[in-house]
Image (cartoon, rainbow, N blue to C red):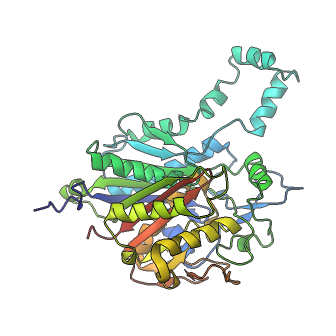
Amino acid sequence: MRSAYLDASGRPLVAVTGLGVVTSLGRGKADNWSRLTVGQSGIHRITRFPTEGLRTTIAGTVDDLFDRSFAAPELSEKLALIAAEEAVAQSGLGRPGDFPGPLFMAVPPVELEWVQKQELAASSNGDVTYQALLADAARHRHTDYHAMFLFGSVADHIADHFGTKGSPISLSTACSSGATAIQMGVEAIRRGDTEAALCIGTDGSVQAESLIRFSLLSALSTQNDPPTAASKPFSKNRDGFVMGEGGAALVLESYESARRRGAAILGFVLGCGEKGDGFHRTRSSPDGRPAIVAMQQALADAGLKPDQIDYVNAHGTSTPENDKMEAMSCTAVFGERMGRLPISSNKSMVGHTLTAAGAVEAVFSLLTIAHGRIPPTINYREPDPNIPLDVVPNVARDAAVRRVISNSFGFGGQNTCLVFADSPA
């Protein structure tokens, strides 16, 4: 007889015992959920840096929690810390500074930003040559930059703070990164490497250079006025995504461990699927096959059939191509049922939190299950006739939701899908 703590494949069931989140809607699950479900947007005009002359002047930045601006790695770390403190406290797992498992952390790519580059140029008296910069570095005047802009530094600091075990894993798989961090935690528990894992996605990279780069790719919405109406996934008049910031954390634990210590179970991660797509650096494969396979793999991994999913938490970026591809791919997986299977995009309110998106949307998916309320896709005023989906429009929908598939499709063909549920069965 199979143990109640194992799935049909004989692997440990993975429960969620802690959740934490911070976005442009606010700090913590309560603020985010209350504002998300009333259709409030956190997107606003950028005040962090000058935007004169830019085609896009809006973003879902996290500003009100801090009294000054930070470089992207610093802000990413602070957002991760806020989310993880909430998640670890809710889980009640371990002791302060002694988390009994590894850290899997999605962080954005890091590089010196314009402010630091300008300071380096000034310190070399205008002689910005390679030899001059080497000479300046030899005087050890910028060791803080070196520490700040190392890719693994954010995860190292978070690991030190929480006392996670083993070497922290830093990963960056474009916009699927947050989901990939969760997948790695699930796999570690299933392998028996650990009984618990702290999984985080964070991104504080709304800076001038990153905004301009996405703008040059024609990926961003230029509908700046009003800012709250710019992100409109699945709408006919969508014109691009809106950058956002945030952090989210999940404490994953083997079901057996969680039950043994009497922890409150917030849900389960039943399935993970991923599929790489080498078609193009930014564009999706026209046939949608990688996204289709990622969803199919997640369902198969969960031991579920398509008709057992109650809600699709869409990647839903509001770009013309992504939304069309996702609709086509979902229809290929769920068939004619997509006309009545609820789907919505949190990005309509918090923007696209990039590296953090998969983790942020995982938290929102589990809250949807817990509360029986599906957050809306706001700004859905002009449906796209080529995307015949049951988009939850503008107002939250109360529904019995037991199982959710959450999609994360990233630039460079990084596709990761997760299945969450209220119970193992």
Residue 103 can be seen in this image: yes
- Position of 30 relative to 89 (above/below): below
Nearer the observer, 11 or 223: 11
Residue 202: x percent and y percent?
Answer: 55, 50
User: What is the number of callouts on the image?
Assistant: 0
Residue 341 can be seen in this image: no
Residue found 67% across the figure and 68% down from its top? 318
10 lies left or right of 384 = left
Nearer the observer, 414 or 52: 414
The quadrant holding residue 420 is bottom left
Residue 61: x percent and y percent?
Answer: 67, 58
229 lies left or right of 299 = right
The quadrant the C terminus occupies is: bottom left
- Position of 360 relative to 114 (above/below): below
Task: Find the residue positioned furthest to the left.
Answer: 1
Residue found 67% across the figure and 53% down from its top? 282
Residue found 33% across the figure and 69% down from its top? 304
Residue 372: x percent and y percent?
Answer: 41, 79
The quadrant the N terminus occupies is: bottom left
238 lies left or right of 356 = right
- Position of 371 relative to 116 (above/below): below
Task: Find the residue positioned furthest to the front.
Answer: 287
Residue 201: x percent and y percent?
Answer: 51, 51
Residue found 24% across the figure and 54% down from its top? 11
